[in-house]
Image (tube, coloured by chain):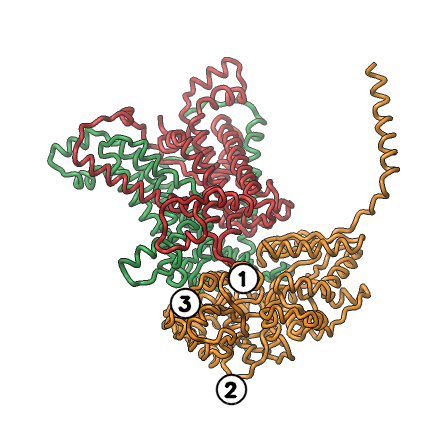
Amino acid sequence: MSGDGVLAAPARTVAVPAALETRRTPFSWTGLVVHLLLLACVALIAFPLYYAFIISTQTVDQVIARPPVLRPAGHAVQNYVDAWTRAHMGRLLWNSAIVAIVSAVGKIVISMLSAFAIVYFNFRGRALCFWLIFVTLMLPVEVRIMSTYEVIGNLGWLDSYAGLTVPLMASATATFLFRQFYLTIPNEMVEAAQLDGAGPMRFLWSFLMPLSWANIAALFVVLFIFGWNQYLWPLMITNTEAMRVVVIGLQDLIPRTGTHIPEWNIMMAAAMIALLPPVAVILFMQRWFVKGLVETEK
Amino acid sequence: MRRTVNVFAPALAALALLAASLSAPAPALAKTEIHFWHAMGGQLGETVSELVRQFNQSQGEYEVKALNKGTYPEVLTAAIAAYRQKNPPHIVQFFDVGTQTMLSSGAIYPVFQLMKEHEIAVNWGDFIKPVTGYYSKDGNLYSMPFNSSSPILYYNKDAFKKAGLDPSKPPATWKQVGEFSKKIIAAGGAKCGFTTSWPSWTMLENTFPWHDQPFATNENGYKGLDTKLLINGEFGVKHIGQLAAWQKEGVYSYGGRMGQPDPKFINGDCAMLVQSSAVIGGFKKSIKFDWSTGQLPHWGAPYKKQNAVVGGGTLWVMKGQKAADYKGVAQFLKFISDPHQQMWWSVTTGYVPITQTAIKNLEAGYHFKKNPEQWTALSQLSGTPTANSRGHRLGNMAQIRDAIEPELENIFAGKKTAKEGLDAAVAKGNDILKEFAAANKP
Amino acid sequence: MKRSVFKNRGLPYLLVLPQVVVTLVFFFWPAFESLRLSFFRSSAFGDKVVFIGLENFQKLLVSSDYYQSVVNSFIFAFGVTALGVGAGLFVAALATQRVRGLVAYRTAVLWPYGIAPPIAGIIFLFIFHPSYGVLPYWLSFVTAYEFNWLLQGWVAMALVIIATAWTLVGYNIAFFLAGLLAIPTSVIEAASVDGAGAIRRFRLIVFPLLAPITFYLVVVNLIFSFFGSFGMIHAVTQGGPGGATEIMVFKLYKDGFIGLNLGSSAAQSVILMLVVIGLTALQFRFVEKRITY
């Protein structure tokens, strides 16, 4: 997902038929087989996380025991406390939250403003701006890391929240999503607002924004996850513990250059803590996500 | 009324402040801050902080601030970036193999010069020779050695006993390593005989000097930048070839790079491990079975038993600071090289003490009798190095290691013969050296 | 279409300013710097910089390591895409076979999308661990072959492919579900009345209708596995063993950040830029039918 984890879905997707949620069918053997297969798939997909959770509740000896123990054990609290303190989770989670939320909100705000300007104004350089923003789709952070690192260094933003969040904030795809949406707003609405004497900002605030909540929410989900799961960028520009984000901070716990018995149980506990917020966001905001991105045309 | 209160309040406050300041002890003059960036995390990092604290408390003019900036490459990249912003730290810790890179940089302030210009007397002759050999140019120390280690053999005494081997006699030759391994595996003492951490460092970079074999031309790079690797010669092929053969037999079990193989030894899967002496402290806390250490195994005749080269890291002083700060830097470096600090650092971390005085004092305190493992590393660093065993002066050594280790993996996985793999490694390594030479034409 | 617009003169500039500034400072400037640096050879500290023209590129083109990384990137990207899209289609097709609980199933498979690839990688690293992992343990009952990702390149590659596909499959399923549900049931019923079995129906009717979505997902998965997977590789395999999982993005980082060879790293950046441009152009050409303004 170039740029920021979002690609605007093909313009012609789908309105989900209302009948989706309430189909009722009589019992059938094929239905049963299908259900079983689906459950098997769900189980397969869920297994790694289940396994990680199990490990996070065991003691080190149980972890390395043969045959592997696949039931949860009772050591969870100790492991999670250990993971929390040893990896300084509080700080890490805080940093990740800041990066995720600030970059998501920042992106949404400036993309919305840009899209609004491009759609609703005729100004010189409009086409230039449009293409300028478009081209950034082709410049994911990975292809510009060394030089972006230099720029950040020049600004004195190494090891800072500014350095972590601002470079993530220009998002072409969010701009396109908003633009696409604004293009579907009928002219009559704009004219009515102008007749009412509403200025452009008023129009944006009172008319467009309420209409685009689904888009905004969906974008927030994707951008939050993208920001939370950022790896390369925080890896490069932060090297003090105080500024690390959680997916990097976990590294300290990986039993890699271990002079002690690898503590996979602590590692898994830390991983569980780290993945909880974005997964929770997806679970709770799943509906918006699907509505706003998968089903773009209503 | 409001007005009056507003007039009185600040006056009262000022009086209070005056009173407080008169009764308080005279405030200390602001200390000059010295920034020290290092790569020691976890337990080691805490020990560094303690060392720094001791220095700060011993005098009132300077305050050293130690900061863990990540791994060695991360520390250097951060330092370079800072240097380019004209805001470098005063002291940077970098690893042994980065010495050539630092020397060619033009960004460092040689330590011997620092001490001379600030008239701080350091007994340079007190440092052990392998250490001075590694970090000196033209007989002068350019960086201050800090955490030095050497690769030694760790072995599982319980496994030895099970196989009927004398647990107080670790194998001294590679042949014995093979024999012991087979006996242990047969007796069920372990699943594999031995494994090696930091494969390039232990099996090539140290094994060559240990046998007085040249690792690269130009006396391992000391004499010029147009250096070429020599690890694919007869000795290299013989040694690595034997490891590959043992890998097939299960005597040797390749476990990955850096310290990744350590768990194989700790959990008893492998009876022996070649790893840095720096992990002694960690092992003491975590290993449950009876263990001890021996020297790095040797092939015996016709190869001489020379010495191992120091590993670990060293402290570089960076240019570009205020002149007044450097006095503090010099004082700090003198502090950490004093016998007392040397002894404390060595005993706490497991890194070897690097001055003769410190070593003698430790001996006098029976330290090595009580902790024989700590003597093992030192015993490999004694004597006078030859041209082959002074150390390595190869530019971009980290990259070279990154070129060598995948080839080692190819060899151990049976994809290439030892000669093919080493030839490929040498080809890539030479390229890197050429690149470095071109980029650093004096 | 003539759009109604607002007439303010200065306001639009103000509105686009934040995005344009960030774009110029953090996208274009570094991109040009990369381009510029790729023509130089720099020392680590940046004090000695020599113009060498296309030499960095030439070196890359003859470097077997670089070709290895390109090949690895393609294997990885296509592996992830094939597995992720294929599995996604399979599960979505199952779920739309007129069963209840569609939303529940979708919820149950969508959440891995929120897991950071490095974390997914670490979990799979453990599952695949030669000494402690549950997978080699189970496989040992089936075959005596020792699956050791530390030594065998293909096992390491399988590990990262599976782990990456795992995080993406939920996303793919969500899209396929929507696409499948949009196919009018009348079309499908007509086909079954005609005597076409489920598989035939799928092949001849459903799959072609799904083409736009499939194409879109393929591009998304490809782009992600080309660029977004750095974290997984860095956290799990560091490109090993023997460079088997060293993808282009990782090599770029390694050469620049660890090897301190800024020139080569910049040259690799430039090449990657061309790849992205190609992929993105592809996506916009075939997926977004019109870009008008």
Disc 2 element = loop
Q: Chain A shown in which color?
A: red
Q: Earlier in the sequence, mark 2 or mark 3?
A: 3
Name the residue type under label 2: Pro
Of all chains, the one bearing label 3 is B
Report the side of B120 relative to A190 (left or right).
right
Q: Position of residue A17 (x, y in %)?
A: 28, 26
Disc 1 element = helix
Q: Position of residue B371 (x, y in %)?
A: 61, 68
Tell me, yes or no, whether dots 2 and 3 are on the same chain.
yes
Q: Look at 63% across and 64% down and name the residue there.
A: B147
Q: Is residue C67 visible?
A: no
Q: Residue furthest bottom?
A: B302
User: Which mark identifies residue B190?
Assistant: 3
Question: Relative to B167, is A60 above or below?
Answer: above
Q: CA distance from mark 3 to mark 1?
A: 18 Å
Q: Look at 56% across and 54% down and name the residue there.
A: C36
Q: Chain B shown in which color?
A: orange
Q: CA distance from mark 1 to mark 2?
A: 34 Å
Report the side of C263 relative to B136 (left or right).
left
Name the residue type under label 3: Ala
Q: Earlier in the sequence, mark 1 or mark 2?
A: 1
Question: Crowding near pointer 3: few (<14 within 10 Å), some, many (20+)?
Answer: many
Residue under label 2? B302
Question: Crowding near pointer 1: few (<14 within 10 Å), some, many (20+)?
Answer: some
Q: Earlier in the sequence, mark 3 or mark 1?
A: 3
Residue under label 1? B283
Tell me, yes or no, whether dots 3 and 1 are on the same chain.
yes
**Which chain's colour is green?**
C
Question: Crowding near pointer 2: few (<14 within 10 Å), some, many (20+)?
Answer: few
